[in-house]
Image: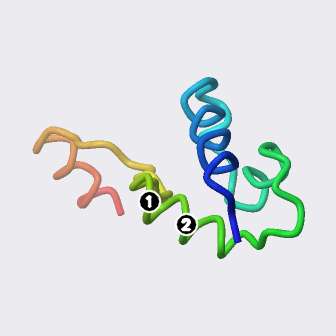
Amino acid sequence: MIQLAQIRETDRILQGDLEIRKLIWQELGWEASLEGISSKTLQQTIGFLMNYRRCIPCRKGWVIKSIARYRVEYY
């Protein structure tokens, strides 16, 4: 079980450095010195209590219609 002090420390770490936010849950646990706590437990606890979640960003951005048409014709 994760203690409240550990949750606060993890939140402090997440608020500090933007590079930390790119870590997977297991790496975040290592960074926050949460030995013995599974990444799934960390995800459920931090995600539920602090409303944090990870998502995979979109790789392609929005394009204008003429470029989109050209892409369709090209492929």
Residue 36: image quadrant is bottom right
Neighbourhood count class around disc 1 (C-alpha, 10 Å): few under 14, some 14–19, many 20 upward: few
Q: Is residue 5 left or right of residue 30?
A: left
Identify which amino acid the numbered label 1 is placed on: Leu
Identify which amino acid the numbered label 2 is placed on: Thr
Give x and y (percent) for residue 16.
61, 24
Q: Residue at x 57, y 40 (%)?
A: 11
Numbered circles on residues, count: 2
Q: Residue at x 81, y 56 (%)?
A: 34
- Residue 2: numbered disc: none
Q: Is residue 72 left or right of residue 28?
A: left
69 vs 25, nearest the viewer: 25
Q: Residue at x 59, y 28 (%)?
A: 18
Classify 13 as above or below 34. Answer: above
Looking at the rendered image, the quarter that the N terminus falls into is bottom right
Residue pointed to by mark 2 = 45
Residue 37: image quadrant is bottom right
Neighbourhood count class around disc 2 (C-alpha, 10 Å): few under 14, some 14–19, many 20 upward: some
Q: Is residue 49 left or right of residue 35?
A: left
